[in-house]
Image (cartoon, helix red, strand yellow):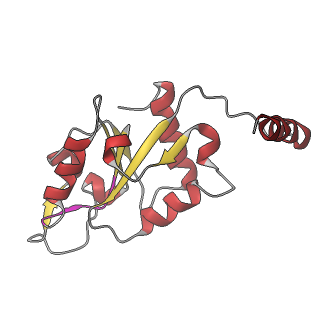
Amino acid sequence: MLTLLRDLRRLRRTIGLPAAGHAGSLALRHVDCGSCNGCEHELTLVSGPTVDMARYGLGIVASPRHADVLLVTGPVTTRMRAALVTAYEAMPEPRRVAALGDCALGDRVLGSSSEIAGRVEDLLPVDLRIPGCPPTPEAIAAALLGLIDGTAGL
């Protein structure tokens, strides 16, 4: 295993792949509260080879118990309200919440108002707001890296 890691490090230097430049990591738990899936498509691109979020220490985890950040997309629907709060309460301290996209921020929401519980910050304390419909992969990565660096616009 150590030989493989050493070979990978040598290959990165040989092809000129830039170093991550960030110390630390974030485990993200994504919760879709009723989005149109535009933000999810962009989030998928963040983990692709162009941005490669794993190189910077960003990773998606399957359980909120392992998460540093709850990444929420879409307006909170009445049917997802309890699930979102349950996921938040299952997270270890310190809990951080990122609202991804205009719908999560309460801007330009499509749908019946009787089915929408509101913005993410109406239910949970939001630490990071990532605007856009949908935000670009670069904007998502930069905002999340700002949480690692402590430069995020909280």
Out of 38 and 19, give the one closest to the viewer: 19
- At 42% from the left and 56% from the top, the residue drawn is 132
Side of 80 where 62 appears, left or right: right
Number of labelled discs?
0
- At 30% from the left and 61% from the top, the residue drawn is 74
Q: Quadrant of the N terminus?
A: top right
Q: Does 30 appear in magenta?
A: no
Question: Where residue 33 sits in the image (x, y, percent)?
Answer: 26, 62
- At 21% from the left and 38% from the top, the residue drawn is 125
- At 8% from the left and 71% from the top, the residue drawn is 114
Residue 153: which quarter of the image? top left
Residue stretch rendered in magenta on the structure: 72-78
Out of 82 and 1, give the one closest to the viewer: 1
153, above or below 124, in the image:
above
Q: Quadrant of the C terminus?
A: top left
Q: Does 76 appear in magenta?
A: yes
Question: Where residue 57 sits in the image (x, y, percent)?
Answer: 57, 38
